[in-house]
């Protein structure tokens, strides 16, 4: 057993023994590009030389390391060599940074091919051109750390090998979130800060140009998909390093203590010869005050051919004031339609998501960009409706007054006496007041006029209809008294119909009292009926009380019509029943038509409809009942004599006897 273990150990050492005897010494020179001795040496691996095969056709599977290649220098990456030389020289010249210590360097080339990327790493580790595991000619090496950069994949591969030898590795390329894994890369440190503010810089650039539809190019790897990640704690030795370079920049290796980096915005200037130049046109500094974070000089930007101004890169044009955004289904949020704001809503900014409703006292202008204060208005005498209805009201009132004068002047004529002069005068005076009643609806409303409008209207029309009802009953009883019978004569003498007016009026007074006691009319504002105006009008208060008043008037009108209809076959000389019946029919038609029209209108028109209904129903009574009598009194006086009346009664009696 012991022999087997010794044999196995000796077998593992065979390659080293063979190489020792086969080679007289280690390589005297390594494969570095640049070497400078020092107390401590820092190795650096930069992709400076690019190997180009001589033949145009390359078989990558059989390509050997020793093929004749043409070397091409990457001038841009050569700046890394100059930068490192400058940094080493500055540190060595400053005795306060590393007292009694000088820094040296060894710079190696890193091939672009991943298969050859570790070749010079092994040269640096072993000092051999041929790779022999666990053997090194550089046991007394002064190397303390390595410096890698630019290509994160190369840094990752180098870090995997260096970790086996516990060599600290510092990479200065773009910050890589995968390389912060302390378990996988315990000795790797990144100089670049976490690019957590890169997205803010890109967003600031887009906001400056009002771009919402932008394509971003990124590498197809984890760095292109991941921006944010939590970092592990840095190595205790490196995270406490804090120095200032020769230009005064603060250098800290602990990313937690670093201030946000400053990003430069570059523009590519293309020249006709095929050359291009990166020109700095702006900066983004996340740590600066908000108003100073982003700055750009648009006048030096060279846009591609075909653009004469800043490109307008949006999926949908911004909605102008007066419109709002409507998100399109299954589309990105920056793709939308613009729709006008609804009625009485505005948007006074570009790209509004929602429209704002104007207050009740304001209205939206035609462009729906501003809320304008509404004008307070009411049904005035200067309004077309007010002028027309006022003239009608005064005209019919004057006509009624004229008819009253005619009846008073001819009060002793048979036709006036036969139709109950007292009831006629009451009816005419009440009609005159009814014609003046609409004037309460015109002008600026107040509490008194609001109460009087509805209650005075109901009271006057109750008197009118009760008077007509009394007249129809009087006509019926007057002609029925001509037939044998004493009871009807006694009733006529006792003037029972005269009690109809006060009784009916008392009922209406009770209805008005209940109306005023529960929910009386009041001043109201209508801000919706008329665009841009607030209409001051009277609210009826209790709608039930208003319709109860109309229903009560309708019952009396129908009763008067029925009584007049029953007396239609009585003699014509003193019989005004047919005129009363026709006037009641027109009266009912007016108010039946009024109800649907009243409910279909608003504002001033609604008030005007009620006024017109009052005038129309009152004028139907005046014209149909009294105009025929005035015609006989004024133009056919021969028919308004006792002799003429007796002759007509005699002729009608003969006709009745014959039948």
Image (cartoon, rainbow, N blue to C red):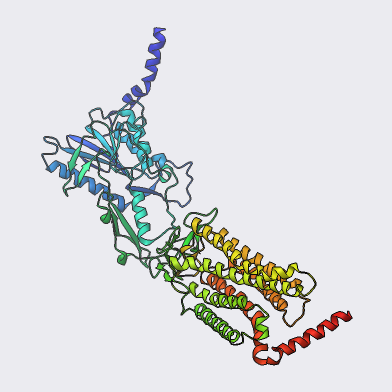
- Location of the C terminus by quadrant is bottom right
Question: Residue lying farthest right?
Answer: 658
The picture places residue 239, in percent across and down from the top left corner, at 24, 35
Q: From the viewer's side, name the closer residue of 281 and 528.
A: 528
Lateral position of residue 484 relative to residue 33, left or right: right
Question: Residue lying farthest top?
Answer: 1
Residue 118 seen by the camera = no
Q: Is residue 88 above or below residue 579?
A: above
Lateral position of residue 431 relative to residue 179, left or right: right
The picture places residue 213, in percent across and down from the top left corner, at 45, 58
Number of disc labels:
0
Residue 97 seen by the camera = yes
Q: From the viewer's side, name the closer residue of 28 and 404.
A: 404
Q: From the viewer's side, name the closer residue of 46 and 2.
A: 46
The picture places residue 98, in percent across and down from the top left corner, at 14, 37
Image point 34% across, 32% down: which residue? Answer: 185
Lateral position of residue 489 relative to residue 46, left or right: right
Lateral position of residue 622 relative to residue 278, left or right: right
The picture places residue 199, in percent across and down from the top left corner, at 36, 49
Q: Is residue 641 above or below residue 227?
A: below
- Location of the N terminus by quadrant is top left
Q: From the viewer's side, name the closer residue of 222 and 540.
A: 540
């Amino acid at each position: 057993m012991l022999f087997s273990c010794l044999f196995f150990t000796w077998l593992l050492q065979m390659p080293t023994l063979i190489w020792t005897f086969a080679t007289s010494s280690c390589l005297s020179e390594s494969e570095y590009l640049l070497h400078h001795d020092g107390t401590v040496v820092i190795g650096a691996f930069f992709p400076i030389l690019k190997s180009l095969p001589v033949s145009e056709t390359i078989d990558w599977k059989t390509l050997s390391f020793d093929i004749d290649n043409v070397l091409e220098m990457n001038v841009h990456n050569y700046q890394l060599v100059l930068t490192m030389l400058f940094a080493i020289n500055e540190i060595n010249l400053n005795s306060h940074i590393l007292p009694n210590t000088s820094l040296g360097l060894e710079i190696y080339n890193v091939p672009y091919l991943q298969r050859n990327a570790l070749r010079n790493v092994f040269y640096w580790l072993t000092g051999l051109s041929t790779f022999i595991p666990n053997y090194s000619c550089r046991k007394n090496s002064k190397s303390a750390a390595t410096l890698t950069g630019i290509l994160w994949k190369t840094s990752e591969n180098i870090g995997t090998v260096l970790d086996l030898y516990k060599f600290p590795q510092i990479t200065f390329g773009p910050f890589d979130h995968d390389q912060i894994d302390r378990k996988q890369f315990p000795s790797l440190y990144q100089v670049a800060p976490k690019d957590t503010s890169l997205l803010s810089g890109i967003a600031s650039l887009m906001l400056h140009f009002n771009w919402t539809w932008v394509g971003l190019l990124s590498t197809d790897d984890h760095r292109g998909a991941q921006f944010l990640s939590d970092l592990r704690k840095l190595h205790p030795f490196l995270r406490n390093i804090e120095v200032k370079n020769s230009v005064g920049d603060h250098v800290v290796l602990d990313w937690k203590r670093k201030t946000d980096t400053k990003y430069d915005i570059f523009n590519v200037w293309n020249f006709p010869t095929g050359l291009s130049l990166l020109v700095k046109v702006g900066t983004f500094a996340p740590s600066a005050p908000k108003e100073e974070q982003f700055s750009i000089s648009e006048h030096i930007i060279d846009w591609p051919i075909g653009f004469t101004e800043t490109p307008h890169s949006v999926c949908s044009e911004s909605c102008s004031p007066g419109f709002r955004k409507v998100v399109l289904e299954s589309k990105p949020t920056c793709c939308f339609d613009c729709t006008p704001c609804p009625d009485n809503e505005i948007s006074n900014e570009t790209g509004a998501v929602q429209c704002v409703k104007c207050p009740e006292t304001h209205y939206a202008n035609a462009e729906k960009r501003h809320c304008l204060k509404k004008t307070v208005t009411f049904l005035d005498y200067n309004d077309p409706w007010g002028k027309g209805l006022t003239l009608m009201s005064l005209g019919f009132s004057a006509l009624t007054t004229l008819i009253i004068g005619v009846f008073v002047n001819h009060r002793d004529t048979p036709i006036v006496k036969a139709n109950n002069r007292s009831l006629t005068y009451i009816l005419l005076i009440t009609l005159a007041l009814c014609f003046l009643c609409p004037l309460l609806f015109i002008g600026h409303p107040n509490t008194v006029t609001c109460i009087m409008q509805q209650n005075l209207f109901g009271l006057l029309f109750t008197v009118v209809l009760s008077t007509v009802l009394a007249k129809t009953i009087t006509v019926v009883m007057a002609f029925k008294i001509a037939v044998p019978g004493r009871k009807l004569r006694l009733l006529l003498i006792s003037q029972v119909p005269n009690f109809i007016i006060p009784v009916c009026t008392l009922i209406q007074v009770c209805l008005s009292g209940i109306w005023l006691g529960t929910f009386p009319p009041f001043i109201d504002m209508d801000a919706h009926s008329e665009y841009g105006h607030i209409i001051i009008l009277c609210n009826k208060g209790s709608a039930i009380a208003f319709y109860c008043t109309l229903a009560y008037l309708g019952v009396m009108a129908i009763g008067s019509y029925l009584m007049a209809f029953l007396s239609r076959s009585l003699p014509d000389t003193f019989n005004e029943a047919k005129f009363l019946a026709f006037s009641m029919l027109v009266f009912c038609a007016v108010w039946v038509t009024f109800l649907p029209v009243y409910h279909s209108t608003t504002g001033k028109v609604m008030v005007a409809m009620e006024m017109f209904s009052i005038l129309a129903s009152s004028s139907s009574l005046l014209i149909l009942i009294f105009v025929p009598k005035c015609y006989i009194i004024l133009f056919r006086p021969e028919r308004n004599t006792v002799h003429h009346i007796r002759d007509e009664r005699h002729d009608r009696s003969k006709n009745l006897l014959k039948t």
